[in-house]
Image (spheres, rainbow, N blue to C red):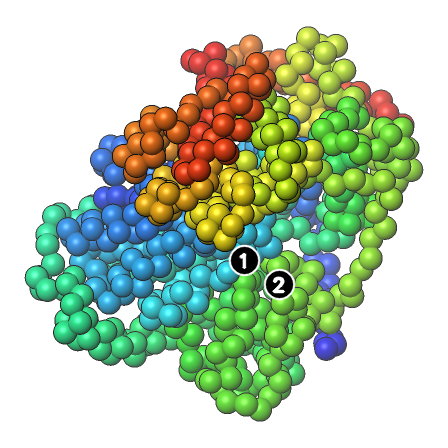
Amino acid sequence: MKKILLLGDEAIGQGAIDGGISGIYAYPGTPSTEIMEFIQRSKQAKENKIHATWSANEKTAVESALGMSYAGKRAIACMKHVGLNVAADAFINSAITGVNGGLIILVADDPSMHSSQNEQDSRFYGKFSLLPIFEPSNQQEAYEMTYNGFELSEKIGLPILLRITTRLAHSRYGIITQLSKTQNSFSVPKDPKQFILLPAIARKRYKSLLEKQSLLQKISELSSFNHFIVGKDKSLGIVACGISFNYLMENFQDSELPFSVLKISQHPIPQEKIKKLYDESEELLILEDGFPFVEEQIGNIVGIGKKIRGRLTGDLPRDGELNPNLVAIALGIEKEKQTNFPEFLATRPPALCPGCGHIDVYNALNEVMKDFEPQRILSDIGCYTLGALPPYNAINSCVDMGASITMAKGASDAGMFPSIAVIGDSTFTHSGMTGLLDAVNDKSNIVVIILDNSLVGMTGGQKASGDGKIDNICLAIGVEKEHLKIVVPLRKNHELMKKLLLEEINYNGVSVIIARRECVTELSKKKKLKVIK
Amino acid sequence: MRYRIIKKEKVKSDKMKKDIILAGVGGQGILTIAAVIGFAAVDKGLFIKQAEVHGMSQRGGEVISHLRISDKEIFSDLIPKGKADMILSLEPLESLRYVDFLKEDGYIITNTKPFENIPNYPEIEKILAEISSRKNSRLIDAEEIAREINSVKSANIVLVGAASLFLDIPLENLENGIKQLFGKKGEEVVNQNIFAFRKGREKTENQAG
């Protein structure tokens, strides 16, 4: 059998193609972006006419995938963990409607916040919505879970949550693939009322979801992804969830693993297996990347008695991702070591690329703001968030997608002047437009600066949903023509930008300034590609 | 907690296992290096795992990749601290950032040209002196070597050549890795890079260790 070297994300993309999807829907977000990118590049996906375009946000992605499922076909929706917050309404209700064609919701968590605002654990969403959760321990399992997941989803009539973390998403390994399955043909749900969540119907469907729980429990108990390794030494039993299983095994490359281990990669938690481990062992150690999800549930399954160690007891850190050393320390086979780094070792934070248009905007904005009180700039999520760092120190917030506009509105309502929002074009169409409508309706005294680089910059230059449409969107929302300004952020336009900013700050109402210039990094990539071609 | 772990007797002494930390600044191209060594390892029929950094830090920040090569299954995507056989760095300051990963007798192989995109970049003499003071270090002016052979774009591959002395991967496989990576760009580019690879190896061989 041939092995192909794939990133975890790419393995999931290949698993989805081979598993017979008809469509993938996603919004770019580290560490999930490469799944869509892989499918967009795949010849096999093109030949099979798999639908693969970026959605405006994660909610529209999940809803479109659910629509494809409604029409009987298999679909996958992909996002980063905070994207599931945006998609939560659709996601949780999709557990009540159930599916027609197989549906996988892929969520990539980012413990240690390598590229995120928080490190929330998506497994809680899975439990909250009573859906089966898969957490692969390696890239091969990720492939298999995706490949077989659609069939399981159809069998149980429910979507499946596939949860990965950064290390699995962005690490390459040799993957053995399987024969491609054919796509489903079009069919609407057998029950015409399945997707109508009117209270009377929703109550019935919710009951049926609750009734399915014992089946899910049984499937999980028998799953080959949850396996029990018997050890001779009964002084400790280890539960290793998802990727933490690898960190455990890493420590036993040159020695026998003496303890019993329950590897969990499928939820609901296999209760019988947990009970067996608990009964046999003197105490338990719970390893999981993310929140203490299993650790918190385990008391309800086995009762209170023996010691259960993990992130809650301080045997492992409460925050951040795990690694082989942290596991070794928890096992008592390694001590915490202090490394003496040279004193002069300066950190090197990420920065805006040389020549980036955002720099020109921040230079102008900073000069204009010298004449006002500090901390008046609410911003958002994207490359331009790096404007918070020196030498710019230009912005005062970064909370969630679209929050710049709405927070500026709220702050203005509270009397803050000037109240300025700085947001990227893709973030604007993701979740900023609705907030702008609120501001227009209230005639809030805010200035919205839309940094339009015509693509999604931070995640590597994906197509932006609103490309070429931003001006018209603003006008249609009700921004006055006289207060919609467009400028090219270049050094030569520095004075012009300052003048526009000052004018619009002094206008009592909603102003939008669009600073439009293509991302320099993506522009140079394009040029290079042209040279090669 | 303290458990007694019984060490297995060393079964084979000829087993192949190399854990390499690749370091650099976002945009420098550590993934090119990872790709060449990765392809070479696969060419030799070895297992590899390679964890890389995507997203925010790619914008001119510090970047690291964990490259693991072995003749048996690899578990962790991350190299444990204190276990890396080599730090291979495209930038001198970055080569010191991950010394906690390095084994006691591990190698630091680094390009000497600083990438100064921070205001508090330390004095380069201090950095190079610190690297030289460590056991098993090799300092390579990869840009200069690449310029000497009229192939300025091949500095990364010069560095792979330097590292090849300590990789335990046959030259043939490494050169196949280069062919695989640059094959699409034509024979001339392939040959240029193979030349750069050999030069990097040769110059490092002549360095006193």
For the residue pair B192 and A512, the one nearer the viewer reads as A512
Height in image: A318 above or below B204?
below
Q: Quadrant of residue A255?
A: bottom right
For the residue pair A508 and B77, the one nearer the viewer reads as A508
Q: Quadrant of residue B5?
A: bottom right
Point out the tag, 1 or 2, that comes first from the N-terminus: 1
Residue A448 seen in the current view: no
Residue shown at the point (26%, 61%) measured from the top left: A94
Residue shown at the point (53%, 88%) measured from the top left: A279
Residue shown at the point (61%, 71%) measured from the top left: A311
Give the image location of residue B28, x and y in percent.
Answer: 64, 28
Question: In what element is the residue under mark 1?
Answer: loop
Give the image location of residue B8, x and y in percent.
Answer: 71, 65
Give the image location of residue A445, x and y in percent.
Answer: 45, 42
- How far apart are the two marked residues, 1 and 2, measured between alpha carbons? 8 Å
Read off the chain for label 2.
Answer: A
**Which residue in the structure is indicated by mark 2?**
A319
Residue A244 seen in the current view: yes
- The quadrant of the picture occupied by the C terminus of chain A is top left
Q: Amino acid at mark 2?
A: Asp
Q: Which label was assigned to residue B97? A: none
Mark 1 vs 2: CB contact within 8 A: yes
Give the image location of residue A174, x and y in percent.
Answer: 48, 44
**Left or right, B125 with reference to A324:** right
**Left or right, A78 with reference to A290:** left
**Which residue in the structure is indicated by mark 1?**
A119
Q: Amino acid at mark 1?
A: Glu
Height in image: A85 above or below A279?
above
Height in image: A461 above or below A530?
below
Residue shown at the point (44%, 37%) measured from the top left: A508
